[in-house]
Amino acid sequence: MNPVRSSMRQLGVSLRALAVLTLLLGVGYPLAVAGIGQAALHGRANGSMVSSGGTEVGSELIGQSFTDADGAALPEWFQSRPSAAGDGYDGGASSGSNLGPLNEDLAAAVTERRAAVAELEGVAPEDVPADAVTTSGSGLDPHISPEYARLQVDRVAAERGLDPEQVQALVDDATQAPFAGVLGSSTVNVLLLNISLAELDT
């Protein structure tokens, strides 16, 4: 067989295989996965968005701050843990601080945050939980510990003129047990908790 003709034939086979595989794996497979995701897990496939009063207010998978334009905590809301992602909870800049426990900048930031939280909640600095003053590895953690949520109950109740027991009941309802009862620790989703708090006013 003519070597040139043989090479052209092999090139043609390769190009046809490339076209078929591109259609199957570059178009067909992604469309199939997206379709299955939309059909079977519509909410999760679209970012696990959460609505309040008919308006999407965030994702239950990504934390957000409840502060004013200057970054000061809004006392009528439960506060999230700090974030090191961009300017805070930036999904496009997910990261932790990458600072080690002996880093002076980290130690100073933790001390400053502890003092601020203690003042806001009216407690001694040693009573402030660790998650109130440290960032998560992703910088996007939407959860706080039940201990940090309980620390905020009296302040939120006072700001809203509510019975602290009523606010504590919301925290209890929002507390999620460890996966399978043993993996991880109990958590409270701050966005979902604040939505349930807002619904008391409607």
Image (tube, grey):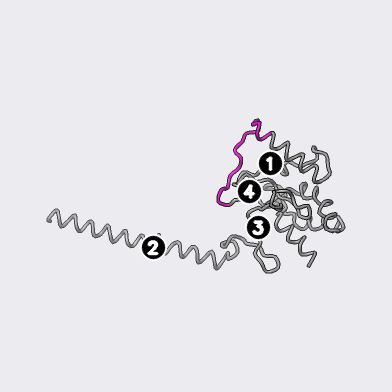
Q: Which label's residue is closer to the chain start, 2 or 1?
A: 2
Please report contact status of discs 3 and 4: CB closer than 8 Å, yes or no: no
Which label sits in the foreground, 3 or 4?
Answer: 4
Magenta stretch: residue 8 in it? no
Q: Earlier in the sequence, mark 3 or mark 4?
A: 3
Decide which of 97, 40 is in the foreground and name it: 97
Please state the horizontal and vertical placement of residue 145, each as a whole percent of the image.
Answer: 73, 48
Q: Which residue carries the number 1 mark?
A: 134
Residue 33 is left or right of residue 67, and the answer is left
Q: CA distance from mark 2 to mark 1?
A: 46 Å
The residue at which mark 2 appears reads as: 24
Please state the horizontal and vertical placement of residue 96, each as a whole percent of the image.
61, 42
* Range of magenta residues: 91-107
Instruction: Name the kind of residue labelled 1 in the image.
Output: Thr
Identify which amino acid the numbered label 4 is placed on.
Gly
Outermost residue toward the front?
A: 70
* Residue 168 appears in the picture as rendered: no
Mark 2 / mark 3, whichever is N-terminal: 2
Identify the mark at residue 88; answer none if there is no mark. Answer: 4
| Lower position in the chain sequence, tag 2 or tag 4 | 2
Q: Which tag is nearer the camera, tag 2 or tag 3?
A: 3
Q: Quadrant of the N terminus?
A: bottom left
**Marking on residue 60:** 3
